Image: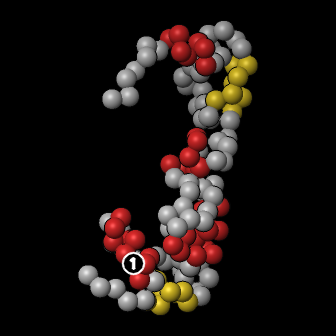
Amino acid sequence: MSYTDKMLTCVDCGAQFTFSVEDQEYHASRGFTNEPKRCSSCRQARKAERGQGGSGGSGGYGGSGGYGGYGGYGGSSRPMYPVVCAECGQRTEVPFEPRGDRPVYCRSCYAAREPARSRY
């Protein structure tokens, strides 16, 4: 399929930007069916807002981030919540906000309670 540069309008700032032949080829190679909605600078600002870093390959599409921006992939820190372990009473932090209806354990007590599960 042959592509030609397209002029699109950013939904955030209203600026015109070019959806280049290279970007269209990249979209097609990844199976993307929708055209981009944001210009490069608004796309980078949105990624930074969501904790995913920014920049990357042609037009900023092939870059970093992913998987919610947590863990080793995105580089931003996940919010941690202070708790007291239901088993040993040790103060610790967990990466989720406890609801109060279930016990919360420190890392070592949790590891001792749960048998190792296969990821596959």
Measuring 58% from the left and 86% from the top, which residue is drawn there? 14
- Does residue 100 sit above or below 33 in this rendering? above
Measuring 70% from the left and 12% from the top, which residue is drawn there? 89
Amino acid type indicated by mark 1: Gln
Residue 98, horizontal then vertical, whole percent: 61, 31
Instruction: Say which quarter of the image contains residue 99.
Output: top right
The scheme the figure's colours follow is: secondary structure
Left or right, residue 114 beside residue 88: left
Measuring 52% from the left and 67% from the top, which residue is drawn there? 57
Residue 103, horizontal then vertical, whole percent: 57, 19
- For this rendering, which residue is in front, 49 or 54? 54
Measuring 62% from the left and 10% from the top, which residue is drawn there? 87
- Does residue 20 sit above or below 54 in this rendering? below
Q: Which residue is mark 1?
A: 24
Quarter of the C terminus within the rendering: top left
Quarter of the N terminus within the rendering: bottom left
Task: Give the structural element (helix, strand or loop) at label 1.
Answer: helix
Residue 74, horizontal then vertical, whole percent: 59, 49
Instruction: Say which quarter of the image contains residue 88.
Output: top right
Residue with the most extreme left position: 1
